[in-house]
Image: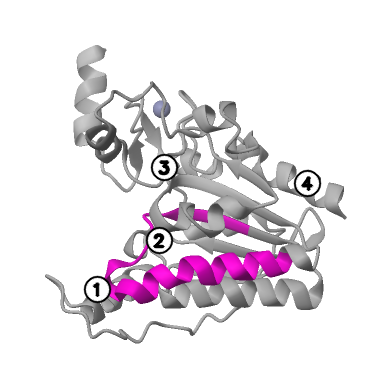
Amino acid sequence: MGWFAKTRRNIIPSNVWEKCKRCEEAIYRKDLEKNFWVCQKCDYHFALPNLDRINLLADEGTFEEFDAALASDDPLQFQGVVPYRERLKKSQAKTLVKEAITTGYAKICGLPVVLAVFNFDFMGGSMGSVVGEKIVRACENAIQRRHPFVLVSTSGGARMDEGILSLMQMIKTGMAVARLSMERIPFISFLADPTTGGVTASVAMLGDVILAEPGALIGFAGPRVIEQTIKQTLPKGFQRAEFLKEKGVIDMVVHRSQAKNTVGKILRFFA
Ligand SMILES: [Zn+2]
């Protein structure tokens, strides 16, 4: 049977079965989809596509996107190994969206919110000038309508192709969130795997309540860079959601099956 299981794993068509990255179990894709991409055997949380994340949190049929047409203009005319303009086009064709964040109005457990969800499939969820602008507009809409702001992050950090303009989004989004605070609008920040770099160093860590998915990598620089810098071995589980919860960096580690209910409860508390 062991041989059979091994063989089956090797010959399974990838569009029907998915292999769990942690326990290596082959899982029927339809079951995974039904389970919001959590392994039923070992509880590993697969990366959740942007649209599935919106469906996970928002009440059915309530999400109304805004600023969907905003797209980057390649302000620096950046020529990397692949020119920025080309990379953008490729990402847009792959994900069918214009940028690495989707923003809109929604209801969660019957309560109205402004919801913003990073899209890791779009250039690693990197924050360039358009992502920053969309977060600011989302905050402004939240203030105008007096709705809480819910942000789900999954990002590699700043978008290198936009240089300093990308770094400026850290202060720009930070200022927008400060305005939410002055207007007494609650901000729930939900961190998914991975949340790193300039997004961690700005908007993602400024939530009134900070939630994270189990096992999510959350940090600024990667562990290898830190080890090389401080010349010390890092503790086990460093930069993972559970470790950060223990250290008081985040408030709660929330299983995906409980994500919506938990956000709903927090919203009711603030309401
Ligand atoms: Zn598994």
Name the residue beneath numbered marker 4. Answer: 266
* Foreground pick, 204 / 111: 204
For the residues marked 1 and 4, what is the alpha-carbon distance in whole angstroms?
Answer: 38 Å
- What amino acid does circle 3 point to? Arg
Secondary structure of the residue carrying tag 1 is helix
Q: On the rendering, which quadrant does ligand 1 occupy? A: top left
Name the N-terminal-most of marks 1 and 2. 1
Name the residue beneath numbered marker 3. Answer: 29
User: What are the residue bounds of the magenta stretch?
Assistant: 151-180
Position of 26 compared to 67: left or right?
left
Q: Residue furthest front?
A: 230
Tell me which secondary structure the magenta stretch mostly adopts: helix
Name the N-terminal-most of marks 4 and 3. 3
Q: Nearer the viewer, mark 3 or mark 1?
A: 1
Is residue 203 rendered magenta in the image? no
Q: Nearer the viewer, mark 2 or mark 3?
A: 2
Secondary structure of the residue carrying tag 2 is helix
- What amino acid does circle 4 point to? Ile
- What amino acid does circle 1 point to? Arg
Could you tell me if residue 185 is visible in this image?
A: yes
Name the residue beneath numbered marker 1. Answer: 87
For the residues marked 4 and 3, what is the alpha-carbon distance in whole angstroms?
Answer: 32 Å
Name the N-terminal-most of marks 2 and 4. 2
- What amino acid does circle 2 point to? Gly
Q: Nearer the viewer, mark 4 or mark 3?
A: 4
Name the residue beneath numbered marker 2. Answer: 125
* Mark 4, other Cα within 10 Å: few <14 / some 14–19 / many ≥20: few
Do the residues under discs 1 and 4 have CB atoms within 8 angstroms?
A: no
For the residues marked 1 and 2, what is the alpha-carbon distance in whole angstroms?
Answer: 13 Å
Do the residues under discs 2 and 3 have CB atoms within 8 angstroms?
A: no
